[in-house]
């Protein structure tokens, strides 16, 4: 049992105890060992115990379920289970995997509440607000950067054609194809007319 596993189990149990439905989902799987691989973190190995809580798994025990996260898992979390399923590699107990993926999607840590116990309500609210603003700023900056790169690629360097130019080209190709088909038909009619 590693420190990482023990700490994760403690934090997860705190979340699970707040949500009775989550404990009920895990309770039938008592004795199962889950290994979650989320690079660059070390693998997280947890054993489900009676009542649906978890503890750090023994080092020598084999995992009955392994969930390995792909790089796009964070973007997939809010999009739904279908996207989440594509963002992980799963091997082992499929029923348990379904329950754990549902927990990952719906179980939320109330950071502000936990911080308020340590720092007080006002400071916790400001801390969480600052993190939200920073996250929103990063998303907006990323969106603007992507738009600028696309505009540069389209307008300045001509690496990518615009949608209108592409549509014009596609229409021209379709017209040329139709003209060639008509020409081919005319040639065949003339040849058939001379051959008779």
Image: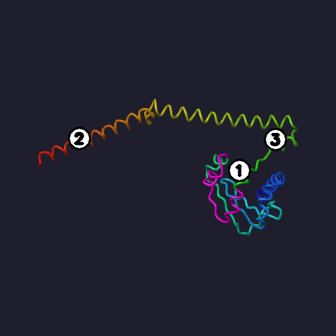
Question: Tag 1: Cα neighbours inside 10 Å, few (<14), some, or many (≥20)?
Answer: some
Say what secondary structure mark 3 lies in: helix
Label 2: which residue? 183
Q: Earlier in the sequence, mark 1 or mark 3?
A: 1
- Number of the label disc, if any, that sits on residue 112: 3
- Number of the label disc, if any, that sits on residue 105: 1
Q: Residue 4 at what x, y percent from top left? A: 76, 56
In the image, is 17 to the left or to the right of 33? right
State the residue in front, 67 or 119.
Answer: 67
Question: Tag 2: Cα neighbours inside 10 Å, few (<14), some, or many (≥20)?
Answer: few
Q: Residue 106 at what x, y percent from top left? A: 73, 50
C-beta proximity under 8 Å, tags 3 and 2: no
Q: Residue 140 at what x, y percent from top left? A: 63, 33
Q: Which residues are magenta?
A: 78-100
Say what secondary structure mark 2 lies in: helix
- Residue at image position (68%, 59%) is 98
Callout in the foreground (1, 3)? 1
Say what secondary structure mark 1 lies in: helix
Against 1, residue 18 (above or below) is above
Callout in the foreground (2, 1)? 2
Q: Earlier in the sequence, mark 2 or mark 1?
A: 1
Question: Tag 3: Cα neighbours inside 10 Å, few (<14), some, or many (≥20)?
Answer: some
Q: Disc 2 and disc 1: Cα gap in Å?
A: 60 Å
- Residue at image position (62%, 58%) is 89
In the image, is 159 to the left or to the right of 99? left
Callout in the foreground (3, 2)? 2
Against 130, residue 33 (above or below) is below
Q: Disc 1 and disc 3: Cα gap in Å?
A: 19 Å
Answer whether residue 96 is magenta in the image: yes
């Amino acid at each position: 049992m590693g420190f990482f596993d023990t700490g994760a189990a403690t934090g997860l149990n705190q979340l699970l105890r707040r949500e009775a439905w989550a404990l009920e989902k895990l309770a039938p799987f008592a004795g199962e060992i889950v290994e979650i691989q989320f690079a660059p973190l070390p693998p997280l190995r947890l054993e489900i115990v009676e009542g649906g809580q978890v503890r750090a798994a023994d080092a020598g025990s084999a995992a009955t379920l392994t969930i390995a996260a792909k790089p796009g898992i964070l973007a997939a979390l809010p999009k739904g289970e279908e996207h989440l399923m594509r963002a992980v590699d799963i091997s082992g107990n499929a029923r348990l995997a379904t329950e754990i993926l549902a927990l990952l999607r719906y179980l939320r840590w109330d950071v502000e509440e936990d911080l308020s116990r340590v720092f007080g309500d006002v400071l916790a609210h400001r801390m969480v607000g600052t993190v939200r603003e920073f996250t929103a700023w990063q998303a907006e900056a990323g969106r603007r950067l992507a738009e600028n790169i696309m505009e540069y690629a389209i307008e300045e360097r001509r690496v990518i054609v615009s949608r209108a130019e592409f549509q014009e080209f596609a229409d021209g190709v379709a017209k040329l194809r139709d003209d060639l088909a008509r020409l081919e038909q005319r040639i065949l009619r003339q040849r058939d007319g001379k051959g008779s």
